Image: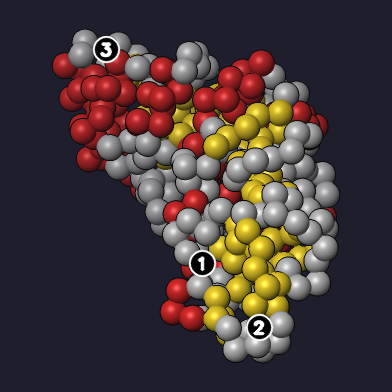
Amino acid sequence: MEKVHETILEIDLNALTHNFQYLKSRTNTQTKILAVVKAFAYGSDASEIAKHLETLNVDYFAVAYTNEGVALRDAGIVTPILVLHPQSVNFKTLIDRCLEPSLYSAFVLNEFIKVAEEKKQTNYPVHIKFNTGLNRLGFDSTEIPKISSILKNTKSIHVKSIFSHLAASEDFNEKVFTENQIKLFKTISQSFAKTMGYQPMLHLCNTSGILNYPDAHFDMVRSGIGLYGFGNSDIEDEHFTPIATLKSIISQIHRIKKGDSVGYNRAFIATKQTKTATIPIGHADGIGRQYGNGKGFVTINNIQAPIIGNVCMDMIMVDITNIACQEGDEVIIFGTNPTANVFAETAKSISYEIITSISQRVKRVFLK
Ligand SMILES: *Cc1c(COP(=O)(O)O)cnc(C)c1O
């Protein structure tokens, strides 16, 4: 690996291949794989990730918002894209760019039909989302007759899939709750098929659902965090490789004496002779203030250096008193060791939050 000269997020596409193949090995060959590439593919780079996954024959993509789907189409992605939370102001654009909406209430269903009819569509693919316990988005199971009567009045759309989302698939203490969600989803899909006279594709599992509920994979599974290298448990983490490594360098080293302070508001006061390093990454890059004042750490020459004082917008200062290092040396914030999950835990956060927080200012570098 080349020496770094600035803060970068290094993205290992071979690790992505590995994670994708591992997830495939945990599903049946007929089960389709949908890759969730919302939020810049969990803070990496949606276009590059999607292009790579297309070479691996991924079946579907999902994004949260319409503009994320538009960006993928602009990048040349041709695989079907499910938009999980489209907003009705974007429905025209969504159809123009061949994106497929998740419709989760009678209001959005009717709004979408209006636009689809205006645009003279027939059988435009849509996905109906049911709420089975997360209480976030989704039709209630009792609304099937209502959905059916709306659908029977239009030729403009066709239900390609029905789906739901698990609330606690990574948590074994919530096994009963999750099994009830699975049961309810089965009931919904049977009742939907009976009412409509055909069976759309069914999907329920996110990454932890794939790993922990192999009997609930249905026709397709939706993985996000697993593709990026996290299994949401110590045991499952072993099978995955984090794709992203956040690296930086030492900009300057200071030797300060007892009583000297470091950073804004003098939040760190040295209790002894201290050697500090200034690193060019701050809260504007995604390292929040909660990592400051001894909570978070960076790794220099395999030794942990705690972040001292307040995190600045563009910089952090770390204690390197016990580390042999020089200006220009490489600094690891997270990657394969420590993982983003371990780094996040220092500030009571989780992998999902830290990896999606790394701002667009940080250059993305791809390893192929
Ligand atoms: C984000 C999201 C996923 C992906 O979940 P992971 O835990 O990252 O695998 C799947 N389905 C829906 C509806 C989502 O919003």
Q: In this view of the protein, which residue sits in the foreground, 65 or 162?
A: 65
| Percent position of residue 24, x then y | 75, 30
Badge 3 residue CB within 8 Å of ligand 1: no
Residue visible at 63% across and 23% down? 53
Q: Is residue 128 visible?
A: no
Q: In this view of the protein, which residue sits in the foreground, 148 or 348?
A: 348
Residue visible at 63% across and 59% down? 252
Which of the 4 image quadrants contains residue 366?
top right
Q: Element under label 2?
A: loop
Q: In this view of the protein, which residue sits in the foreground, 38 or 203?
A: 38
Mark drawn on residue 257? 2
Q: Nearer the viewer, mark 3 or mark 1?
A: 1
Q: Is residue 83 visible?
A: yes
Residue visible at 81% across and 72% down? 322
- Of the residues under marks 2 and 1, which one precedes in the sequence? 2
Q: Element under label 3?
A: loop
Read off the residue under disc 1: 311
Read off the residue under disc 3: 121
- Of the residues under marks 3 and 1, which one precedes in the sequence? 3
How far apart marks 3 and 1 lie (CA) works out to: 52 Å
Q: Amino acid at mark 3?
A: Gln
Q: Quadrant of the N terminus?
A: top right
| Percent position of residue 95, x then y | 30, 19
Mark drawn on residue 76? none
How far apart marks 2 and 3 lie (CA) works out to: 73 Å
Residue visible at 42% across and 38% down? 64
Q: Residues within 10 Å of mark 3 (few under 14, many from 20)?
A: some
- Of the residues under marks 2 and 3, which one precedes in the sequence? 3
Q: Amino acid at mark 2?
A: Lys
Which of the 4 image quadrants contains residue 275?
bottom right
